[in-house]
Image: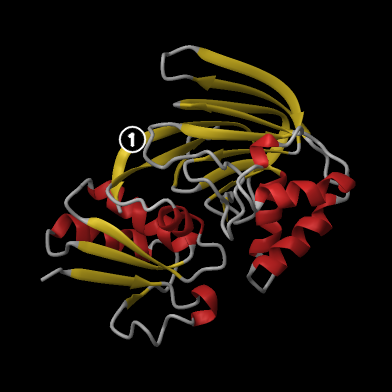
Amino acid sequence: MIRELFILNPIAGGGKANKRFPAAKRTTGKGDAEKWACEAAKSGEYDIVWAIGGDGTVNEVARGMVAAANSNVAMGIVGVGSGNGFANHLKHNHVEGMVDVGWLTLEDGRREMFCCTCGVGFDAKVAADYAVAGTRGLKTYVKKALKGWFGYEPATYNIEVEQEDGTTDKLKMKALLVVCGNANQWGNECHVTPQAIVNDGLLDLTIVEPVRLKSLPRMLVQIFGYSFDKNSHVKTMRGRRIKVESDRPVNVQYDGEIVCGADARPFETQCIELQVQQAALRV
């Protein structure tokens, strides 16, 4: 018999999963899912720990599982959030087994793990606005993105990408946003890093240069398909380690969660480092 633990975010997706999983452990705040997942994986009492929620819940459960370092225990996902980026990637690419995770290191020394994507610039600014919007879902996200578009000042980035062979590629350019993907999407089938593979030991980088509003319809068609990397305003790179420096402080997001400071306000930084941890999590 398969031994399973279900960890549920009771407010994910408007609470639509509550009746389906009456016996699940319900989180009451940030950190619960990570703690319970780590304890369950270390205990040896479970074969699968299920994350029931969105990408934030998945991130916490995955973080706990990685910390436990018990590859005999798998993480399962019931995606009931507003984006479900990691769940969508695994489902559409028929992925099971060991997968990679990414790590973000901030200039103040903090480290955050991500399963899907991590980004600086405009997408992180939208994530910050979305977090306090009061409503969830793709419609709200698009509204915040369109509203934030006007008046947003792109930064200039210095980017270093370490390849598999140890060589380093460098790039300097002005960009609207810089997104690093372990998986291929933000969520909602929005494929910002369309060629990313979760078990290749590499991270994919998408850099979007400043564009005019009239260019957005074509970009939207491409990003909801799998051809965003074919857009002439998009530059892509791939590697094991990535360093991104900006000429001004910018917001940071990982798996849709905004990085905040000690005062709970959105944190801004001018340097992040990213690296992949290969085969870190069984799914």
Quarter of the image where one finds residue 90? bottom left
**x then y, percent, for residue 181:** 52, 41
Give the image's coloring scheme. secondary structure
Q: Which residue: 44% across, 78% down?
A: 10
Residue 160 seen in this snapshot: yes
Q: Is residue 178 left or right of residue 256?
A: right
Amino acid found under the numbered disc labelled 1: Gln
Q: Is residue 17 left or right of residue 177?
A: left
Residue 38 seen in this snapshot: no
Q: Which residue: 74% across, 24% down?
A: 173
Q: How many tags in the picture? A: 1
Q: Return the residue nearer the eye: 255 or 182.
A: 182
**x then y, percent, for residue 259:** 57, 49
Q: Which residue: 16% across, 51% down?
A: 72
Name of the residue lying farthest toward the top = 167
Q: Return the residue nearer the eye: 244 or 80.
A: 80
Q: Is residue 72 left or right of residue 34?
A: left
Q: Return the residue nearer the eye: 241 or 232.
A: 232
**Which part of the image, by quadrant, shows the C terminus?**
bottom left
Q: Is residue 14 above or below residue 108?
A: below
Element under disc 1: strand
Quarter of the image where one finds residue 212? top right
Q: Is residue 199 above or below residue 31?
A: above
Q: Which residue: 66% across, 74% down?
A: 135
**Which part of the image, by quadrant, shows the N terminus?**
bottom left
Q: Is residue 37 left or right of residue 110?
A: left
Quarter of the image where one finds residue 180? top right
Q: Which residue is mark 1?
A: 278
Q: Is residue 33 above or below residue 200?
A: below
* Label 1: few (<14), some (14–19) or many (≥20) C-alpha neighbours in 10 Å: some
**x then y, percent, for residue 7:** 33, 70
